[in-house]
């Protein structure tokens, strides 16, 4: 199977925002490594720890930001395209906890669907988690979902997913904070 990747990035020097904790190297205030998108991997030319799939152009934006110095922008040019930008997040070992995944998003004349999604590892994936899709134009707003922990988890993949034909989408400040799990 052949996958096509198209990347357009602006290289900028970044600062480390993620504060290390004693046990696993990830801040308890947010377990998403480089969730602020500030630290840029010079070799790959996009935020350290983040990966990109899809046909839509994805660029590091230092002009339109929610907080800090950078956001990621996904550009749709008139043909149907998609983009998935994702990062791996360590799990919480307490199965009575959940991770609340949040991201700041902004859209301009976006004709398509934008949502957050998460998978619990290891496969097989018993269930995916996602927010309701949004579209159109909006200033910065928060998308949020809770992902309950389960025994034997080795990680979570957090994804920002956009599929559409026209417009621009930005995201910034992706976080995963520990919360009490809701009783089902």
Image: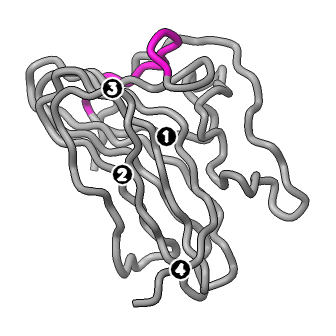
SS of the residue under disc 2 = strand
Residue linked to disc 3: 139
Q: Quadrant of the image for the C terminus?
A: bottom left
Q: Position of residue 90 (x, y in %)?
A: 65, 63
Of pointers 1 and 2, the one earlier in the residue sequence = 1
Q: Is residue 167 left or right of residue 16?
A: left
Residue linked to disc 4: 181
Measured Cα–Cα span from mark 1 to mark 2: 15 Å
Disc assigned to residue 116: 2
Query: Comparing marks 2 and 3, which lies closer to the viewer?
Result: 3
Crowding at dot 1, Cα within 10 Å, few <14 / some 14-19 / many 20+, comes out as: some
Q: Residue at x 38, y 23 (%)?
A: 73
Residue linked to disc 1: 51
SS of the residue under disc 3 = strand
Number of numbered tags placed on the structure image: 4
Crowding at dot 3, Cα within 10 Å, few <14 / some 14-19 / many 20+, comes out as: few
Question: Which region is colored magenta?
Answer: 55-65
Crowding at dot 4, Cα within 10 Å, few <14 / some 14-19 / many 20+, comes out as: some
Measured Cα–Cα span from mark 2 to mark 3: 17 Å
Query: Comparing marks 4 and 2, which lies closer to the viewer?
Result: 4
74 or 173, which is in the foreground?
Answer: 173
């Amino acid at each position: 199977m052949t996958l096509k990747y198209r990347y357009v990035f602006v290289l900028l020097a970044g600062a480390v925002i993620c504060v290390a904790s004693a046990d696993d190297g990830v801040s308890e205030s947010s377990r998403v490594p480089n969730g602020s998108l500030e630290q840029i991997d010079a070799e790959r030319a996009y935020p350290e720890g983040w990966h990109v799939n899809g046909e839509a152009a994805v660029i590091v934006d230092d002009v339109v930001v929610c907080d800090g110095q950078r956001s990621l922008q996904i550009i749709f040019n008139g043909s149907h395209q998609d983009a998935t930008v994702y990062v791996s997040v360590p799990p919480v070992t307490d199965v009575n906890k959940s991770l609340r995944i949040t991201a700041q998003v902004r859209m301009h004349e976006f004709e398509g669907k934008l949502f957050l999604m998460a998978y619990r590892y290891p496969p097989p994936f018993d269930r995916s988690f996602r927010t309701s899709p949004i579209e159109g134009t909006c200033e910065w707003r928060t998308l949020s979902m809770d992902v309950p922990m389960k025994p034997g988890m080795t990680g979570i993949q957090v994804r920002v997913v956009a599929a559409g034909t026209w417009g621009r989408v930005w995201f910034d400040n992706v976080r995963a904070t520990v919360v009490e799990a809701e009783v089902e």
